[in-house]
Amino acid sequence: MRFTDDTYTEPFMCTIGIDFKIRTVDLGGSTVKLQVWDSAGNEKFRPITSSYYKGAHGIIVVYDITNQETFVNVRKWLQEIDRYACKNVCKVLVGNKSDREEDRKVTTQEAQELAEQFNLNFFETSAKNAINVEEAFCKAAYCICKIAKIWLKEDINNWPKSHDKLGLQKKVVEEVCLIIGICVSRDVTIYCVRIILGVIEFKKKL
């Protein structure tokens, strides 16, 4: 996998069951641990994949720019996400295989319009040439960490006056868990991002 191991192999082999990987990244001075779950995208594993949505704080939806059907299916997957994921989940749309421009079936403009319609962050990537893969995953992690900081600040504002507030810095241990569904060639790849453990620091003016 390009993001976790910085590797790429052809032909692509679909995952059977679940594969698990870990990677730590730096986001603006904050260290975030990523647990990556690579799950099979076969239809028979769909109940397992959809169950991951419930605990996700961010989801990456990946289509193949050389396959129009995968782009059409994005809407179906977004409906699935809306059905099972939490209300404020961070979503990122990714068009993969940008290295195969001569085989392109989905224009960048089409994808940008869809992303704007559903309020999604958008990237075109090439796993083969390592283009924008890092940026797409880090964008998802950054978005959910930003949301987490807002939640934490709200929690601190609600502390009772008697609560000990000696420190201006509060360290919060969270984990960003990327649960990845690798789908068959005619479907869409789904990446679910869940914050559980990592370290985020922020200052609160008392």
Image: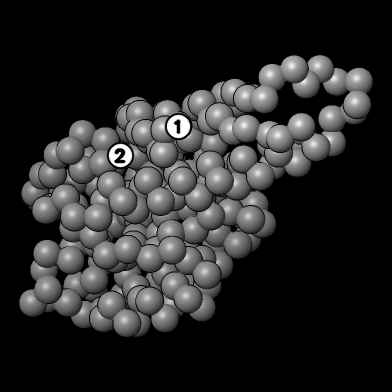
Disc 1 target residue = 30
Q: Is residue 130 above or below residue 64?
A: above
Viewer-side residue, 157 vs 69? 157
Q: Give the image quarter of residue 2.
A: top left
Q: Give the image quarter of residue 37.
A: top left
Q: Earlier in the sequence, mark 2 or mark 1?
A: 2
Percent position (x, y) of residue 114?
A: 44, 77
Disc 2 target residue = 16
Label 2: state its secondary structure.
loop
Percent position (x, y) of residue 71?
A: 34, 73
Name the residue located 12 percent from the left edge and 64 percent from the top edge. Answer: 99
Name the residue located 32 percent from the left edge and 63 percent from the top edge. Answer: 123
Question: Of discs 2 and 1, which sits in the foreground?
Answer: 1
Give the residue type that dot 2 points to: Ile
Viewer-side residue, 67 vs 198? 198
Percent position (x, y) of residue 153?
A: 71, 39
Say whether residue 32 is visible.
Answer: no
Label 2 and label 1: CA atoms lie apart by 34 Å
Name the residue located 55 percent from the left edge and 46 percent from the top edge. Answer: 146
